[in-house]
Image (cartoon, helix red, strand yellow):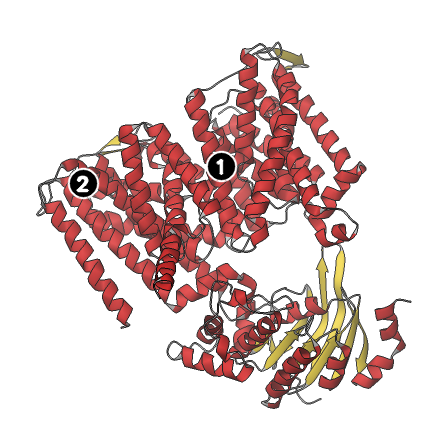
Amino acid sequence: MFFSFDLLFEAVLFGVLLGCFYAAVSMGLAVAFGLLDVPHVAHPAVMVFGAYCTYLLGLYGWDPILAGIVLMPFFFVFGIALYRFYFETFEKRGTEAGVRGLAFFFGVAFIIEVCLILGFGVDQRTVHATYIGTSVSIGDYRIPQRMIVAFGLALILTVALTLYLSRTFTGRAIKAVAQDEAALRLMGVNPVRIKQWAFGIATAVAAIAGAMLIIVGPVEPTMDRLYIGRTFCIVVLAGLGSMTGTLAAGLILGISESIVLMMLGASWAPAVAFGLLLVVLAVRPQGLFGR
Amino acid sequence: MAQPLLQVKNVFKHFGGFTALADVSVDIAPGERFGLIGPNGSGKTTLINCVSGALRNESGSIVFDGEEISRLPAYRRTRLGIARSFQIPRPFASMSVLENLMVPLEYVARERRGEEEHAMALLRQIGLADKAHTPSNQLSQVELRKLELARALAAQPRLLISDEAMAGLSGSEVDEVLKILFELNATGITVIMIEHIMQAVMRFSQRVVCLDAGKIICEGAPADIVKNPDVQRAYLGA
Amino acid sequence: MRKGDLVYWVSAAIVLAVLVAFAMSDANEYFFFAGYTVLTVVTLATAWNILGGYAGYVNFGTAAFFGVGAYTAVLLFRALEAPLVIQIVAAAVVCGLMGFATGLLTLRLRGIFFAIATVALIFIMETVVINWRYLGGATGLQLLRPDLVGPFESYTRMLFAVMALMAVIGVSIARYIEVSWIGRGLRAIRDSEEAAEASGVPTLKLKLFACTVSGALMGAAGAPMPMYLSFIEPFSTFNLLWSVNALASAMIGGTAHWLGPVLGGLVLSSLQQIVTVTISSEINVLVVGVLLVFFVVAAPDGIFGLLKKLFLWRSRSSR
């Protein structure tokens, strides 16, 4: 293994782009789990489903970014329906719901995986666009253009979501419902409607995240398992409920993975997310910016 | 006082940036009937949680019967003799009333035979004997409160902390619970009562402490506490 | 000994005797081949339920424990030509330790973090095995079965009998935990962990105990698998389907009683064998997922709960 500062810098640069992508992909979970406390282990599976929808639209010549944006309202509605179902079935009933809620989402994730295998097979699928497959030179380094596109999308998404949560009434109500539901009720706001709206947003974000996923690389149906590790790692490292923390945590994971990729190769890189998650849980479970 | 049963010394507790308890110190004498009052959010339950072990205080010490307990997990403190009831009752919902009592009997008293008879005796003492085999998630409010106390009692405590056991109960139900607490105290159990129902606190306590915003603002006999202007201000606002 | 205990032990002995006698009969080999898998799932589901059903901590990583059990057996077989019994015991010890370590790291936190940590286990263990040449790496290993078959006609029949014994032992352990003060403590933890601590229950210790026993039993169930297949490779051994089957069997059968995972495992496994043979293996996997979600949503007490209600309704209406 040949070590050089050049290689390291390139790994870090790639890691920053990757990390921003991971952060964007985790935003939906940061809302669904970090703020709403829903044990949504099926979120990565929904995102992979979004990636496959993008692929389908791609077969008809749709640009993946456009496809992702167009999918968002459909996923939004799906998210509201899913939350409504979850709430009526589980959250209302209390303590027993913990195990059942987890088992439910696990089952949903598994069903999505199997349906994707049935529909598309286990082979990898990719999508085509002008910015996929080409590289751009920045100084001495060659960066794949698709990474820059994903990075740009991710930044826009992060900024938009952070602004939404802090500047709009609904957005602030979402953050409030995470902290004090009773107070919100006293203000005349229905917490269930807020939560369902938030969950809808989180699911819509999963749609565009899915588009980014297939832009960045090929997708296959069982990818969601790896992303459970990555997204939960980021959300926990960030601290539940912190959006800016999600960006920071994403960068930490992205850079770590990129360096491990450079030093140990591709077979060890997936273990980074899970390993980092276990370390965070053992050492500082409230994360970097936890409430 | 002679060797206090419980000594809380300079206890601090923070939640992120919020200070729930600031330099709280109080001594409880053995066999005492002690009242803890204060407006919502003043830190009463937080203090109780730190004493019972549900939370850890960041600094300061908590000494029970001469032994420093701040670093002990909650179940060890229960085994040492500190029992508490919960503000919002937490029955073991999948179990009957009788089974609920068998848990502390098996884990504190370490009884492995004859717990059922012992549990029935406790239920008779509390007045829940006829509900012994009812699933605990089917009890009324006052029955749930009594179950909380019965469960705490089954742990054979020397110190019993009753956290708002009478909230939301009718006048006669308040009397029922109060009578139980008096009886328990008569057998030598030290009782700390957290309550908002002033007439209950006045009737029960020998000494009262008032918390506000994490600090003790007043300590003394019940009659004096009620007249104290700081206490009135804490409850009614300036 | 309580009256119920006697009834149980006699029934268990009868069941075991019937299964072993069946293994010595000349029934079609296919039954033992399929039956071995059914018994494995019953054991895994029973093990899962000790932590998932009794204590309320969901384990997604059954496949990790199963896989590590299988590979521990392979390691001992290759290195020391260890007999099956030693393989099983070693697998149980290694996986018990793995359960203990995972629990120590995450059982102080909320249930969902323990669940995610168990997913991490699958990934990490699979990665370790893939990079371990001695154990076959990604391509796998062929294994030569020893000649010992005892009183049975074939090695598969012997393994079937071994698995039958393991299932009975596993269920007996689960039952003992359930009816004892340990089970009551676990249920207290599941109902309200805070109240359990306040009632003197050493919650962390009990959770670690359940996690260790559960893991050990899962590892033991995995140990004979390499011999059953004469082959081992990481992707099918660490397949998430083992996790889904264990969890689904317990939740479909009913998590409150030791009979639940047994019923669920029997029903689900048999259904899977039928569907795989008559329709396809992909549809089979879909059926498992759908059934899981259906039962979790519509029949949370599982088959056992439904039977109980039916029995109560019958006895009430007959008055």
Using the image, determine if residue B56 lies above or below residue A89.
below
Q: Which residue is mark 2?
A: C32
Residue C62: tell me if it is visible: yes
In the picture of the structure, the residue carrying the numbered disc 1 is A108
Task: Report whether residue A25 is seen.
Answer: no
Q: Does label 2 lie on the same chain as label 1? A: no
Spot occupied by residue B34 in the image (x, y as percentages of width and height): 70, 82
Amino acid on which disc 2 is placed: Phe
Residue B84 vs residue A264, the one in the foreground: B84
Q: Where in the figure is residue A67, as x and y percent of width and height?
A: 62, 18
Rendered view: A272 above or below B114: above
> Tag 1: Cα neighbours inside 10 Å, few (<14), some, or many (≥20)?
many
Left or right side of B161 for C36: left
Give the Cα separation between the discs numbered 1 and 2: 33 Å
Q: Amino acid at mark 1?
A: Val
Going by the image, does A116 lie left or right of C139?
Answer: right
Query: Badge 2: few (under 14), some or many (20 or more) residues near its Cα, within 10 Å?
Result: many
- What is the chain identity of the residue bearing mark 2? C
Q: Is residue C9 left or right of residue C66?
A: left
* B147 to C305, vertically: above or below: below
Dividing the picture into quadrants, the one containing residue B222 is bottom right
Element under disc 1: helix
For residue C149, side relative to residue A124 (left or right): left
Q: Secondary structure at mark 2?
A: helix
Of labels 1 and 2, the one closer to you:
1
Task: Tell me the quarter of the image containing the N terminus of chain C.
Answer: bottom left
CB atoms of marks 1 and 2 within 8 Å: no
Q: Position of residue B155 (x, y in %)?
A: 52, 77
For the point 51% across and 16% down, the residue is A126
Q: Chain of mark 1?
A: A
